[in-house]
Amino acid sequence: MKKVVIVGAGLGGLSAGIKLAASGFSVTIVDKNNHTGGKMMPVQLGEYSFDFGPNTITMPDVFKRVFEEVGENPEEYLQFEQITDHTKNWYMDGTSFLQTTNIEKMESILSSIDRYSFKNYHRYLSETKHLYQLSEKHFFSRTFSSVKDYLSPSLATALMRVRPLESMDHFHRRFFKDERVLMAFNRYATYIGSSPYSCPATFSLIGYLEMVDGVYYTKGGNTSIASSFTELFKKVGGNLLLDTEVTSLIIDHKLVRGVKLAGGEKLEADLVILNGDLLTSYSHLLAETDRPHMDNRKIASFEPSISAFVMMAGVNKTFKEFVHHQVYFTSDYRKEFQQIFIDKKLPDDPTIYICNSSATDPNRTKGSNLFILVNAPANPNMSHQEIVEYKGKIYSKLKQFGIDISPHLEEEMVVTPNYIKTQFNAYKGALYGISSHRKKDAFLRPFNRDPAIKNLFFTGGTTHPGGGSPMVTLSGMNTAELILKNLF
Ligand SMILES: Cc1cc2nc3c(=O)[nH]c(=O)nc-3n(C[C@H](O)[C@H](O)[C@H](O)COP(=O)(O)OP(=O)(O)OC[C@H]3O[C@@H](n4cnc5c(N)ncnc54)[C@H](O)[C@@H]3O)c2cc1C
């Protein structure tokens, strides 16, 4: 039986592990943390339950496929609930508008704030559907192992049709005029950790996913996706080693022979899959001489995606104005991205996202389980004083909107970019690996197979097709498929 070691129990590692274990490989997944799911991490603070990481779930069929491909019924493991009226957007002038997948209702909302957006909404949906369908057909369900894979004429044609040369903001201005509506749709760039003023319009496809395909919540918490993957992985015969860090790969004659663990132990392997952030994994686990195509200079040349400053607040009150997702926008969205990516500082007037999953699943937690997230540059080291001050800034901005959290706060945990970097070995604390600003990084992400070490593979947010929970799950299944089809 061929032995596979997967470094990292993120969604990419788990989905690859399930498929390979069910296909007869002896698979061991090793993770440095004491939970599976990587950035999809359950957090319990007293009687309050939170999902750290993915709070917005799209493409539920991708998660279901992990079960279906190994002959299991996903309904026995997971229950996805669609949230129709999913996101309420608030602005500094006190106005707000709701985003809903009910198209007639959405049109009626748009008609009351921006006739131009109202008139163009159908066209927007059909253009973003087209972007989604092209990307799904040509990019999502395949792996890239070498430059040769990018040279097929059909792929080049598809690439040119997904608007790679136009920015997301420019694309959205074809359909929407009101700056409030533009900000709400431009926010989709942050789902891939990028700026709407720099990333390609291709990623406007996220709008189709949210506004048509739907926004979902997983009953019991989104982290049940990771726990159900873990249950399935064990059921198909996989081995799990938690609380165990891999410190290096054992390389011999341009092949990986296994991994070394922090305690000094070795695990032999016929092939290894790295699921941790690729830029960190390469530099931590492989000597520079074993990765000529990815030397330290090249690693330093990548721009990391956005990071986050997160507060998980357990509040003994139900806010009547809250839906499942709400966003309190800055007055100057362009400046916010300028501060994050160019000045590399925390925005001084941040856009605040709040997930309140207790609105959909009140039995899961006491009171309100507020997951409050602000976009942050990758890698700012924050002192205790800076953390306290930034937290105060966020709470006082929310107070301006009539949301007074402090008097009702019973539990609180603050997560900084530095925590994300250390906890998940995420390159500079980036949430989604590399940003998608340069065309090369948006479309030509690092390969799923090492060009020099033929039995070393990659899955997860840094690699193809990119970050976000459905994409990394696809990447795990795609990498497993690559191994099954071509190698053994
Ligand atoms: C705050 C935040 C909000 C997010 N919001 C959303 C959202 O709303 N919707 C969405 O779809 N996505 C969201 N994401 C992104 C999503 O969580 C990630 O894209 C996805 O979970 C990454 O999965 P992955 O397979 O790449 O692995 P990761 O989750 O990065 O897991 C990799 C694992 O590898 C382990 N590891 C690394 N190196 C080693 C080593 N040497 N030895 C042992 N173990 C190692 C790490 O500990 C980690 O557990 C968010 C992420 C964060 C952090």
Image: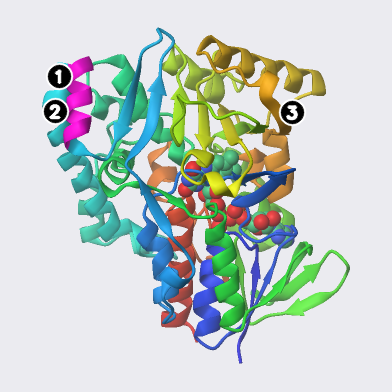
Above or below, 273 relative to 405: below
Q: What element carries label 3?
A: loop
3D distance between C-alphas at marks 3 and 2: 44 Å
- Where is residue 114 drawn, in percent x and y? 20, 16
- Residue under pointer 2: 120
The dominant secondary structure in magenta is: helix
At horizontal 72% and vertical 47% (from top left) the residue drawn is 423
Within 8 Å: ligand 1 and the Cβ of disc 3?
A: no
* Crowd around label 1: few <14 · some 14–19 · many ≥20 (10 Å): some
Is residue 420 positioned above or below 21 on the image? Answer: above
Q: Label 1 is placed on what type of residue?
A: Tyr
Task: Estimate the x, y position of residue 79 in percent, counting from the top left.
Answer: 44, 61
Residue at numbered disc 1: 116
Whole-percent x, y for residue 95 in the image: 36, 13
Image depth: mark 1 or mark 3 in front: 1
Q: Answer whether residue 109 is magenta in the image.
A: yes
Horizontal side of residue 289 vs 216, given as left or right? right
Nearer to us in this view, 144 or 40: 40
Q: Is residue 207 magenta?
A: no
